[in-house]
Image (cartoon, rainbow, N blue to C red):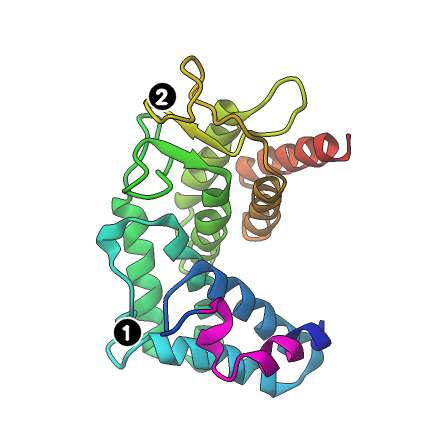
Amino acid sequence: SERMAQSIMARNKESWMTDFREKPRWTYTNGLVLLSILKVGEASGQATYYEYAKSYADTMIDANGKIRDYDMEDFNIDHINPGKLLFPLYKKTGDKRYRLALSTLRKQLDWHPRTSEGGFWHKLIYPWQMWLDGLYMGSPFYAEYARTFDEPASFDDIALQFRLMEKNALDPATGLLHHGWDESKIQSWADPLTGKSPSIWGRAMGWYAMALVDAIEFFPQEHPGRAELLDKLKRTLDAVLK
């Protein structure tokens, strides 16, 4: 893991460059890679990794806690994912900038467009659609926020997201999930009867499985959604193995 992190750091002088952009962007890929590098730092005890990851947050969040290159009105669930990096940074530093940025991302979830059953749209520009990717982008952040800042009622909503995704995207023949589902059934790719996308995509199954693993970590032991998500994880992994 250290060699992987060192390779990334050697190829990207500044941490915001890890998404191959020409300027700093608030992207899920930066968030994923840099949270991973931060965790390598935690495991190895080497501060270099932590400082590299932290520099991304400090590039992207100004003195007032405003997130650079972020517009809540895009209502893009991908833009929630980089926020996971801010939890360990806030815990370690107590820096109010990180807390304010976390609150902004949490507010997006309050107003994020939903399907008629309550599932988060993937993006405002992708109306009525739930994608497997979106479970990874939003739910672990949502769960960690609920655990960190004492929002027990939020766990019901988080469990609902997984329940709706499985209900609407499951392929009964294989136990795998289709990559996307369009409630309106008007997208060119949507099955006119089910709204499901034609593809079952390996990477999307990975997003979904890791969404379950990461969200479960923050669920209270006594919450019924935890057992429900564990059952979903087992079914998913059994289907993948087959």
Specify the amino acid type for callout 1. Answer: Gly
Up/down of 37 relative to 222, above or below: below
Q: Position of residue 186 (x, y in %)?
A: 32, 22
Q: Position of residue 65 (x, y in %)?
A: 28, 74
Q: Quadrant of the N terminus?
A: bottom right
Q: Which residues are magenta?
A: 6-20
Up/down of 123 relative to 43, above or below: above
Q: Quadrant of the C terminus?
A: top right
Q: Nearer the viewer, residue 112 or 88?
A: 112
Q: Are marks 1 and 2 in contact (CB under 8 Å)?
A: no
Residue lying furthest top = 193
For the residue labelled by badge 1, is the local secondary structure a helix, a strand or a loop? loop
Residue lying furthest right = 242
What crowding class fits label 2: few (fewer than 14 Cα within 10 Å), some (14-19), or many (20 or more)? Answer: some
Q: Residue at x 39, y 73 (%)?
A: 22
Specify the amino acid type for callout 2. Answer: Lys
Question: Is residue 213 visible to the viewer in this orientation of the structure?
Answer: yes
Secondary structure character of the magenta stretch overall: helix
Q: Which residue is mark 2?
A: 185
Q: Which residue is mark 1?
A: 65
Q: Is residue 235 left or right of residue 186?
A: right
Pick whichever of labels 1 and 2 is earlier in the sequence: 1
Q: Position of residue 185 (x, y in %)?
A: 36, 21
For the residue labelled by badge 2, is the local secondary structure a helix, a strand or a loop? loop
Q: Residue at x 53, y 70 (%)?
A: 34
